[in-house]
Image (cartoon, rainbow, N blue to C red):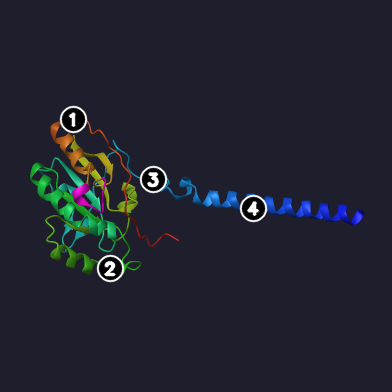
């Protein structure tokens, strides 16, 4: 009788332990498969310009060897500043769309100013020489500048390539009016539903408020030599 009680007790303990383990396993599995864990989380806040801030000018080397600054564009009403690069798949997907932005808006007073923020030591495909090749190959109609000291992109708060900042001239100052993505579909240009950068510039040209002045930039992280 005592042996039977001992056996039953042992079986009960084993079942309880097994059930507890299975429950824990199921909980762990649920946690891993939870949509919250697989959903893309927003980037951490970074310092840099916000909509409404004044953007200071810069002087960076263009692919033609000349220094370029915003002040060079005397007749501009504003600028479409795009932090982009050579190697990033997202940036490559937007190459033609960036060209199209300049073709559409440069003559209306909003030229594209493209800036490569990456350290070429960390990403050789983003070297100055490779930038020159790409600009020639893609027939860039706008300056493609290199942020050699990597001190311009942090001021803007750029975190991705591409990352867009639309500026408007106001009383001699360059005021940030839009920050974020070019549009809402980097993979399929024909399936784009919202052209954020275009909508922002169109609103400025029409003297109307920008409905979405901040969106999440989707792209590759910027390769900074100071980052560890």
Q: Residues within 10 Å of mark 4 (few under 14, many from 20)?
A: few
Query: Mark 4 or 1, which is nearer the eye?
Result: 4
Residue 87: give x, y in percent of width and height: 28, 64
**Is 206 one of the magenta-colored residues?**
no
> Which labelled disc corresponds to residue 47?
3
Q: Which residue is mark 1?
A: 208
Q: Is residue 146 visible?
A: no
Which residue lies most toward the right here? Answer: 2
Query: Mark 4 or 2, which is nearer the eye?
Result: 4
Q: Which residue is mark 2?
A: 125
Which residue lies most toward the top here? Answer: 208
Q: Which residue is mark 4?
A: 22
Identify the residue at horizontal 30%, vertical 37% (top origin). Answer: 51
Question: What is the span of residues highlighted in magenta in the rendered image?
Answer: 184-191
Asked whether 79 or 160 is in front, the reply is: 160
> As displayed, is residue 177 above or below residue 95?
above
Q: Residues within 10 Å of mark 1 (few under 14, many from 20)?
A: few
- As measured in the structure, the alpha-carbon distance from the residue carrying label 1 to the one carrying label 2 is 40 Å
Q: Is residue 114 left or right of residue 38?
A: left
């Amino acid at each position: 009788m005592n042996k039977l009680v001992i056996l039953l007790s042992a079986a009960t303990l084993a079942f309880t332990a097994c059930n507890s383990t299975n429950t824990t396993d199921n909980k762990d599995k649920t946690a891993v498969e939870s949509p919250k864990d697989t959903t893309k989380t927003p980037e951490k806040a970074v310092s840099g310009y916000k909509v409404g801030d004044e953007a200071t000018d810069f002087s960076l080397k263009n692919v033609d060897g000349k220094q370029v600054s915003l002040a060079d564009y005397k007749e501009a009403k504003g600028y479409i500043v795009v932090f982009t690069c050579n190697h990033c798949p997202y940036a490559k997907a937007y190459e033609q769309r960036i060209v199209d932005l300049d073709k559409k808006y440069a003559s209306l007073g909003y030229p594209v100013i493209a800036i490569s923020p990456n350290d070429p030591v960390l990403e050789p495909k983003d070297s100055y020489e490779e930038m020159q090749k790409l600009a020639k190959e893609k027939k860039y109609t706008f300056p493609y500048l290199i942020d050699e000291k990597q001190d311009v992109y942090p001021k803007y708060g750029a975190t991705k390539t591409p990352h867009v900042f639309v500026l408007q001239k106001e009383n001699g100052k360059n005021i940030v009016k839009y920050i974020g993505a070019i549009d809402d579909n980097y993979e399929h240009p024909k399936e784009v539903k919202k052209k954020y950068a275009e909508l922002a510039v169109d609103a400025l040209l029409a003297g109307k408020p920008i409905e979405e002045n901040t969106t999440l930039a989707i792209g590759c992280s910027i390769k900074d030599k100071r980052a560890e």
